[in-house]
Amino acid sequence: MPEVLRADRCALSKIFHGSGFLCFKSNVFYQLCVLTDIEVVVNGFYNFIECNVFYQLCVLLLFLLDCCVLTSYRFRFFVFVDSHKWADDAPNYQLRGVEQVSPNTGIKRYIPDSPSSLTPAKGMLFDTVDDAYNFYKTYAEAGGWTVRKGTQHENRGIVINKYFFCSKEGQKDFRLVDTLVEQPSDRWVRRVPSKRTGCQAAIRIKLTDAKKYLLYHFTEAHNHDFVHEEDLHLLKENMGINRAHEEMINKMSHLNIGPVRAFNIMKEVYGGFDKVGATKVDFKNFKKELNLFIGEFDAEMFVKRPMSKKEFLPNFSCEYETTDEGVLKCIFWADEDMKRNYYMFGDVISFDATYKRNKYNMMFVPFTGIDNHNRNVTLGAAILGSETAETYSWLLRLIKNAYGYAPPVIVTDQDPAMKRARLCMWHIMDKLTTKVGAALCSNTDFRKRLSAVVWTDSLLPEAFDADWAAILNDFGLTDHEWLTYIYGLRESWIPAYYREEEMSGLMRTSSRSESENHFFGKISNPKCTLVEFLSHLDTTIEAQRHEHRKNDHDTRYTNPGEWSDFVLEKQAAQIYTRTIFLDVQLEIQHAIHRCTSVRLDDAGDFIKFFIKDLDQPCSSFFEVMIREEDVTVKFICNRFEQFGLLCSHIFCVLQILDIREFPKQYILRRWTREAVPNSSPESILTDGGDPYRSEEVNRCVREISHATEYVVNKLISKFDKLSDFRDHIKQFMSVADEAQINAPPKTRRNRFAELLGVAPESTATIRVPVGTRFKGCGSHKRLKSQKEQAISQSGSKRRQCSLCKKYGYNRVTCWKYTVAVPEAGASRNVEGNEDTIREGDVATVVEGDGPGSNDADDVFYTSGNDADMDDEDMAE
């Protein structure tokens, strides 16, 4: 008799969602059953998805209920579903092997159905213990179970007896926990299931007089069923990290890709989770063990890697400094390509010490220049542990020793430790709102007028001084302290004062360093170790040099469009790189179409041309002086001195005089195609003569991968040939399985050292810094910047104490900031009344610094409230 079941809400909700009746809510049918007292009778599985008649009845019932026809009737529906139909669709897991049942005891035994050629037999001989283990392991894999190594007996280091068991051999001892007895709070027991069943399947081997291992015992039967082929990859024995996985995790970490994403990438590449051969947990554990291997030897490994390059690679520079306690203080390094770029592009360098991308909060300082494609190029790198004048002096001294001369111009932010560097204009102008007030900058044209005289390079120093004084006088800021201070530094950041210097217009701000920091940040993270950071840096430098090579290639093998028949335009296309030529081409086109000569005068050996620029109708004529004998040009705009390129007004004169050859004295090599040779792609990755890194093996692996991808790409449309190649690879896989490997496998520690390109350390002579702090590194609570404080104060009235007349607090909290406490537990406010010290207030002891001072009396109590502290900072 079928079982009578009351329809429940969950089952009916699934029915209606899966049946396509989207107009029904999930509980409509349940309410219908309650109203009409429907009882659903199901035989076996109560699944109504294919019961179309049942759906029609439901719709009819809902219609009758809406029409108020059914009010007090009771219905009973009997729905019979063929359970055999659903059983046929269920997964069919048939037993592997041969099942034998004892007629007396009913105990089941399972015999693997492995091929006879793989089945062990008594009397077999093996050369080594590993040969016996591999043979038994192959037999187990063919049958759907796994092997575990067992007991062995040795005599003078030689194995004379060895057992190999089924992995389900033995029983796990479960620790019973009495739930009625109170357990310690820190006790935590993991509920891990056991796979042990007490299986007796095993083989035993022993050493004979002929130095062979004889199989003298073999138990074939198991007391458990076997794993199906599609689930073999889920066995723990078939999962683990191999060399390919280790290389993938390490290479992906160079791109700032974690182990989980590396696992997902391998899953997509291999075609499924079952093809990877490991789990996400295995990948994460390997990465964790790799970081533990680095551990306290991080600074030691980090320093030794560039020092090893310095020993084996020519023209590689590296110097570092430690404290008396052996803590890494700072390090600087530059390879041969960086030096070559410095000699060509080191006329102006951007220096920004605000980038932190390691777990120790040490400062990474790249030296950034501009290459012949107007792109960023790294000229050197350093990591600093402090921002002091002493540290910067040490760094600049090393730069001079490494390159042979100090950089002519360094552009940096307004750092007091860098006194002689050119200051970043953007950082200074960004402080304008904070220093002079938001109201003045927003409601007047003060900022616009000041920016007009600061950012231009057409003014002479005398004109700048006059305009600056006029602006400050108009707005009553003549005695402003900060404006007076930065005006005193005008020679370090105003273009009018260094317009005569060579290449002075290339960099006026440290935006190049900001761009470089963003570039490094895409392949690094602030939680990495120093060793990892060095690998990330090598990856970014390699990408930068690859981009430079690509730009050189595009310049050589592409032709730009010519806009005119001017012969100098065609010559410029063959002289300059593609990016620079596009800039020169714009100047030439402007000279042809928008500039004209009004008159000319003789000026001794020179001819003075008066050029009218149609794009600047309000300006006077531009005077260009030229000597025809050697094509020497003089022009007040100084574009060639500032940027190394001629302006449109000079090109206009050259066209008028019909100059047929580009003046060689106005061709700077730094902008030409052959400014520097391309670096070798392996120049970053090689470690010179590092004996712990098998570069030849890695190169061979890359060649095999490349060859395989090449063949697949060629044969992708020829399935027969592709199948033959697959069979060939599989055949060689069997040869590899039978290959005798005499060399012992590398330990995990040595494998880690090989991946990182370092030597495994035993003692650390260079230690990592702890608690490194810099200016502006912040605190545990958010502090308001001066700019934010100025903006907030401009629109709101400041709080003032009515007692002491100071700002930042009121009379209720005045005692927290001004009252000294003569004795513990009480304090007196200004009016002389005692106030009890509240719980949570912090006592700060200030030591006396003069004769007769009493330390016991110099105790002041301040509140630990963050809001009050912010008020105090604002008052300052």
Image (cartoon, helix red, strand yellow):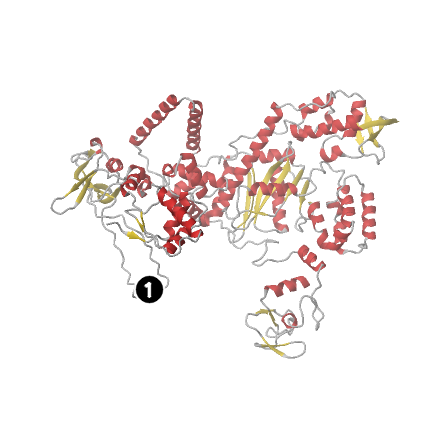
Q: Residue at x 65, y 50 (%)?
A: 417
Q: Mark 1 points at which residue?
A: 183
Q: Please state which amino acid type lies under the numbered disc 1.
A: Gln
Q: Is residue 798 in view?
A: yes
394 in relation to 112, above or below: below
Q: What element carries label 1?
A: loop
List the single residue furthest toward the front: 69
235 left or right of 652?
A: left
Q: Name the foreground residue: 127 vs 312.
A: 127
Foreground pick, 294 / 32:
32
Q: With 599 as the anchor, is 682 left or right in this view? A: left
Few, some or many residues within 10 Å of mark 1 (<14, 14–19, 20+):
few
Q: Which quarter of the image is occupied by the C terminus?
A: bottom right
Identify the image quadrant of residue 658: top right
Q: Where is residue 334 in the image (x, y as percent from the top left)?
A: 57, 38
Q: Which residue is drawn at 77% across and 25% down?
A: 592
